[in-house]
Image (tube, grey):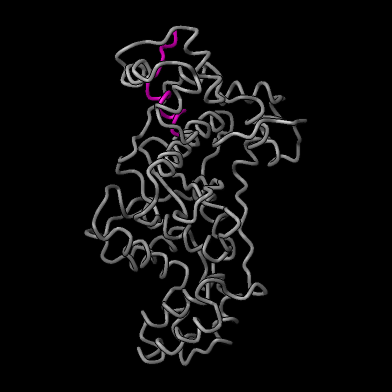
């Protein structure tokens, strides 16, 4: 018989950005009781489980999920975030990452998907610099010289699960984890303000974390950025193209390499192909032209689309004849939310209207 999992109550609450006090008000369960339920000190009654399900918009079975939860401060999490990120928002995104891993595990049971090329972890202490590691990873992935055409597809082919999600925050670009026994996952922010070039840089940055950092270290962000720079803009390929750069040059290179003009300028500075004076002059011009906040729309890079999740959902709905009810039971979700998140990826529709949820 399944046991109530206190950690799932915490995940449910945090995924909806609710405090215990707010959940108490929504469920009509005293906060003192909720505290004991989350702490595993007490077990809920059937009536309380129903009340919690209604307040959090998860089915009662959700609270009996036994998969391991990786906590808020676990070393498997790496984030590109600002220091002023609200704790409630950060916890919500981490909860979504945990739920994504659980759901992907269930979907992959029927998928039998084995990547043709598998990534391996490499730390800086043993393998040299982030740049050397980036070169080794490109070799492992059998990437040709020059720009990476579709970074998302490249990582999916190597077994990385890339999931797009609207974070509803400008303070975080992505969050990733590589839990032993599970495939690496990158949860990408696809809010409207995220341009395609930043999306690609963020994805390469998170790949650097996944490859190099099995635990948190002081220089992790710098190392991940150095990895991303060499991975997306290999020195031997880009150096000759970054000499005596002008705005027009950067605009042309952006369309070829699919990274921002700002990233190309930083790479030129890093490689020493321009002087510090030239760099500062270009930065001043960037500011005058408004490129510091938004580069020309006509140069926009489309956001890449993952296909693994879509293919897994299609496998279940087409080949395995899952309907929305079956899929929601498998993923321990309410039908409305399950359909809203997953069926659009298959071209199928779930007839509404549905309530607007705070998060999922």
Q: In which quarter of the image is the C terminus?
A: top right
Furthest-left residue in view? 125
Q: In which quarter of the image is residue 74?
A: top left
* 9 lies above or below 250: above
Q: Is 344 above or below relative to 156?
A: above
Q: Please name the residue shown 38% across and 30% down the image.
A: 69
Question: Number of callouts in the render?
Answer: 0
**Up-down relation of residue 29 to residue 185 (above or below):** above
349 relative to 139, above or below: above
Q: Quadrant of residue 322?
A: top right
Q: What's drawn in magenta, residue-wise? A: 1-14
Q: Residue at x 76, y 36 (%)?
A: 348
- In screen coordinates, is 299 left or right of 40? right
- On the image, the x and y values in percent for residue 275 come to 36, 91
Picture coordinates of residue 132, whole percent (x, y):
33, 67
Splitting the image into 4 quarters, where does residue 249 fall?
bottom right
Q: Nearer the viewer, residue 139 or 267?
A: 267
Of 309 and 108, the residue lying toward us: 309
Residue 5 within the magenta-colored segment of the rendering: yes
Along the viewing direction, whichever of 176 and 92 lies nearer the viewer? 92
* Residue 322 counted in the magenta span: no
Name the main secondary structure of what is drawn in magenta.
helix
Q: Position of residue 80 (x, y in %)?
A: 40, 56
Image quadrant in which the N terminus is located: top left
Q: Nearer the viewer, residue 285 or 255?
A: 285
Horizontal and vertical percent position of residue 5: 39, 18
């Amino acid at each position: 018989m399944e046991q109530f999992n206190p950690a799932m109550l915490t995940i449910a609450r945090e995924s909806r950005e609710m405090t215990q006090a707010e959940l108490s008000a929504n469920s009509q369960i005293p906060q003192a009781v909720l505290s004991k339920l989350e702490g595993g000190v007490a077990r809920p009654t059937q009536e309380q489980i129903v009340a919690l399900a209604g307040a959090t918009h998860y089915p009662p079975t959700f609270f009996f999920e036994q998969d391991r939860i990786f906590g808020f401060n676990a070393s498997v999490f790496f984030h590109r975030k600002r220091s002023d990120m609200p704790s409630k928002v950060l916890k919500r995104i981490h909860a979504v990452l945990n739920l994504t891993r659980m759901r992907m595990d269930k979907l992959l049971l029927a998928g039998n998907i084995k990547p043709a090329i598998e990534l391996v972890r490499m730390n800086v202490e043993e393998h040299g610099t982030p740049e050397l590691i980036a070169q080794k990873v490109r070799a492992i992935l059998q990437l040709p010289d020059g720009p990476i055409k579709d970074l998302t597809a490249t990582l999916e082919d190597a077994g990385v699960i890339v999931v797009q999600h609207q974070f509803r925050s400008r303070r975080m670009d992505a969050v990733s984890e590589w839990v032993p026994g599970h495939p690496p996952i990158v949860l990408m922010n696809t809010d409207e303000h995220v341009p395609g070039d930043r999306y690609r840089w963020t994805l390469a940055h998170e790949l650097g974390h996944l490859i190099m950092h099995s635990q948190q270290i002081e220089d992790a962000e710098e190392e991940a950025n150095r990895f991303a720079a060499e991975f997306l803009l290999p020195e031997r390929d880009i150096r000759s193209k970054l000499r005596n750069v002008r705005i027009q040059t950067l605009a042309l290179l952006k369309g070829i390499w699919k990274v921002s003009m700002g990233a190309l300028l930083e790479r030129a500075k890093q490689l020493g192909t321009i002087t510090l004076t030239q760099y500062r002059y270009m930065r001043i011009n960037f500011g005058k032209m408004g490129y510091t906040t938004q580069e020309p729309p006509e140069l926009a890079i489309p956001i890449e689309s993952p296909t693994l999740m879509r293919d897994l959902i299609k496998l279940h709905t087409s080949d395995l004849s899952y309907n929305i009810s079956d899929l929601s039971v498998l993923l321990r979700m309410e039908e409305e939310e399950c359909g809203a998140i997953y069926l659009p990826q298959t071209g199928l529709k779930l007839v509404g209207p549905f309530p607007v949820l705070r998060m999922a």
